[in-house]
Image: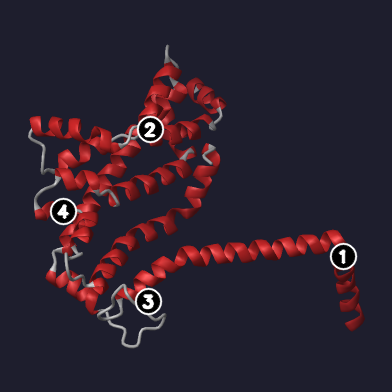
Amino acid sequence: MVDAAIAVRSPRRRALRTPEARTRLILAIVLHVVIIAGALAMFFPFLWTLITSITPGANLTNTPALIPANPSLGAYGKLFADLPFAQVILNSLILATITTVAQLVTASTAAYAFSRLPFRGQNVVFGIYLATMMIPLQVLIVPLFVELKTFGLLDTYVGALLPTLATAFGIFLLRQAINQVPRELDEAATIDGAGHFRMFWQIILPNIRPALATLVVFSFMGSWNSFLWPLIVLRSPQLQTLPIALAGLQGQYISQWDVIMAGYVVSILPMLALYVFAQKYVIQGVASSGIK
């Protein structure tokens, strides 16, 4: 058996003696080292935030120890006891959920129209729609504010939601995914007597689930982290969203950094859970849609 094991290993050893094999091995090792180093570099800020949140009396002048001497969850208790943080999280969750659902509906139906319902000037309209992605929100704030004030929608959920109900990025993403669905399926469904609604619901949507999951992650993340527009529209403290409440935790002269970091950890966890759950679909959606 020893001779057999040596006989099995010996071809591998001989293969590694060639310059090409050694070069491939060295490149693989370097690649893995670079990937691990990059992963650690990206993970360290979250680790630092987490450690600061469980370090009583932590400040930013000294780097906290990787293993705190007296770790405590008191900052999390203070966050929810002294501040209406549960209401703030609920506000952000409501806005993010409605925004995500609305963008799924508007983006999927518009993408189906651009992909499967040709009309005169289709490419021009689609190009103009994509051009709106290059207009920053700061340029539109004043006209949007005046418009909402005219209709009496300031300091309401409706006013905060209206500009986010449709997204050009979502339409582009789903249109690219729908274009990958074979048109032969549409023809077969048409022969069976299916209309556009049935083809959209039973053929298109099941085949673009990865792209839909990708849009869910991007839409939810964009609404969850939105700061400027809710800051301008929502004035009442009971309507505050999470980014605004986190900014309010920093005092002018004294800041309780353990409490602030605890708030950041709480804000990160829902997005982290959503991405971990949809990671496989996000990768498939980005790959199939051709986004680089």
Mark nearest the camera among 1 and 2 is: 2
- Given contact means CB atoms under 8 Å apart, are the residues at marks 1 and 2 in contact? no
Residue at mark 1 to residue at mark 4: CA–CA distance: 64 Å
N-term-proximal mark, 2 vs 4: 2
Give the number of the disc on residue 240: 4
Q: Of 104 and 186, which appears nearest the observer?
A: 104
The residue carrying mark 3 is 63
- Given contact means CB atoms under 8 Å apart, are the residues at marks 3 and 2 in contact? no
The residue carrying mark 2 is 134
Residue at mark 4 to residue at mark 3: CA–CA distance: 31 Å
Q: Position of residue 41 (x, y in %)?
A: 49, 65
The residue carrying mark 1 is 15
Determine whether 58 is above or below 156 in the image: below
Q: Secondary structure at mark 3?
A: loop
Residue at mark 2 to residue at mark 4: CA–CA distance: 28 Å
Q: Secondary structure at mark 4?
A: loop
Q: Position of residue 34 (x, y in %)?
A: 61, 63
N-term-proximal mark, 1 vs 4: 1
Q: Is residue 80 left or right of residue 136?
A: left
The image quarter containing residue 33 is bottom right
Density class for disc 2 (Cα within 10 Å; few <14, some 14-19, many ≥20) is few
Give the number of the disc on residue 2: none
Residue at screen point 35% across, 72% down: 50
Q: Is residue 62 left or right of residue 287?
A: left
Density class for disc 3 (Cα within 10 Å; few <14, some 14-19, many ≥20) is few
Q: How many marks?
A: 4
Amino acid type of disc 4? Gln
Amino acid type of disc 2? Met
Mark nearest the camera among 2 and 4 is: 2
Q: Secondary structure at mark 2?
A: helix
N-term-proximal mark, 1 vs 2: 1
- Given contact means CB atoms under 8 Å apart, are the residues at marks 3 and 1 in contact? no
